[in-house]
C-alpha cells in the first residue's frame, strides 16, 4: 500500500481521479498548508509527496523535506498547469524528482510511475492464452490475454480499442472456480490488434490470485 500526501490549495480529485494515484492500493492525504504538509509527512511517513507548482510555499516545503534525513527516500512530484515556468526549474533544484503536467495525458501514469519508482507494470509477466470478456461502453468484446502481470495485461482484441478507454473485464485463471473481475484502462497499442491494459481496480483477493499465478509460473 502506497501513501501519498497531495499538497494543493484545492482537492485534486477532479483532475487526478482517473490516474494511478486513485488506485485502490493508494492512501491519499490532502494538505492545504505548509504546516499541514509537514505534519502529514511526519505522521503518515508517505512514499510520495505531490506538490502543486503554484503554491507559494512549494519550494520551502521541498527544501525542508530534503533536509530531513528521515525523508531521504521520499519521492516528490510537481504538478504544473499551463506553460512551463521558471519556477519549475527552481523546484527541481530544491529537490523535486520531476514535473508532471495537468491535465493528465495518455502517458501520464507511465511518467508518474517512473518518477516515483512505482511498478506501473511489474517485471514478471506471464505469457499465456486466456479468454477475457471486456465490457467497453455498451459493447461486450471477447478477447484473449497474451500475457499478464500484477498491474497490467496484453490482450488480443477482435476490434480496435481506444487509448485511454476504461473497460470492465472478467477472466478465469486455471483451477479457479470464480472469475477475476475488475476495471482497466487501455494505455497503449502494441499492434493494430494487441493492446496494453493497466489494471486500475482489482479486489485485494483477486490481485493476490494474480500474484499466486505469477509466482507459481516464475522460473526458479
Image (spheres, helix red, strand yellow):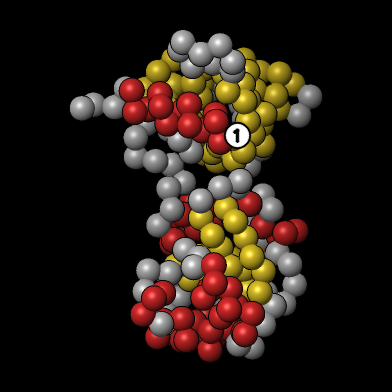
**Image: 92 above or below 123:** below
Q: Residue at x 34, y 28 (%)?
A: 215
Q: Residue at x 58, y 23 (%)?
A: 180
Q: Position of residue 134 (x, y in %)?
A: 65, 23
Residue in the foreground of this view, choosing between 62 and 196:
62
Name which quarter of the figure residue 85 lies in: bottom right
Circle 1 packing at 10 Å, graded few (<14), some (14-19), many (20+), is some
Q: Position of residue 46 (x, y in %)?
A: 50, 65
- Does residue 83 appear in the picture of this structure? no
Q: Quadrant of the C terminus?
A: top left
Secondary structure category for the residue under label 1 = loop
Q: Residue furthest front?
A: 43
Residue where numbered disc 1 is placed? 203
Q: Position of residue 60 (x, y in %)?
A: 53, 89
Residue in the foreground of this view, choosing between 105 and 2:
2
Q: Residue at x 54, y 38 (%)?
A: 198
Q: Position of residue 69 (x, y in %)?
A: 36, 80
Q: Is residue 176 left or right of residue 178?
A: left
**Image: 138 above or below 66:** above
How many numbered marks have been drawn onto this rendered protein structure? 1
Q: Residue furthest right?
A: 138
Q: Residue at x 34, y 35 (%)?
A: 124
- Does residue 193 appear in the picture of this structure? yes
Amino acid at each position: 500500500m502506497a501513501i501519498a500526501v497531495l499538497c494543493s490549495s484545492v482537492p485534486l480529485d477532479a483532475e487526478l481521479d482517473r490516474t494511478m494515484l486513485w488506485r485502490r492500493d493508494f492512501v491519499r492525504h490532502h494538505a492545504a498548508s505548509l504546516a499541514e504538509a509537514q505534519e502529514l509527512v511526519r505522521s503518515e511517513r508517505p512514499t510520495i509527496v505531490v506538490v502543486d507548482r503554484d503554491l507559494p510555499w512549494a519550494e520551502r516545503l521541498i527544501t525542508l523535506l530534503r533536509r530531513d534525513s528521515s525523508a531521504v527516500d521520499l519521492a516528490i512530484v510537481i504538478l504544473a498547469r499551463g506553460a512551463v515556468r521558471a519556477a519549475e526549474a527552481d523546484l527541481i533544484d530544491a529537490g523535486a524528482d520531476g514535473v508532471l503536467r495537468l491535465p493528465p495525458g495518455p502517458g501520464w501514469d507511465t511518467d508518474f510511475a517512473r518518477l516515483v519508482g512505482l511498478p506501473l507494470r511489474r517485471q514478471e509477466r506471464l505469457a499465456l492464452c486466456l479468454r477475457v470478456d471486456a465490457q467497453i461502453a455498451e459493447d461486450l468484446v471477447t478477447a484473449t490475454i497474451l500475457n499478464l502481470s500484477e498491474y497490467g495485461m496484453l490482450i488480443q482484441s477482435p476490434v480496435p480499442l481506444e487509448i485511454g478507454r476504461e473497460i470492465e473485464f472478467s477472466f478465469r485463471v486455471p483451477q479457479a472456480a470464480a472469475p477475476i473481475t475488475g476495471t482497466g484502462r487501455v494505455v497503449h497499442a502494441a499492434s493494430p490488434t494487441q493492446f496494453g491494459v493497466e489494471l486500475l481496480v482489482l479486489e485485494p483477493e483477486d490481485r493476490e490470485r494474480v500474484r499466486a499465478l505469477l509466482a507459481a509460473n516464475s522460473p526458479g
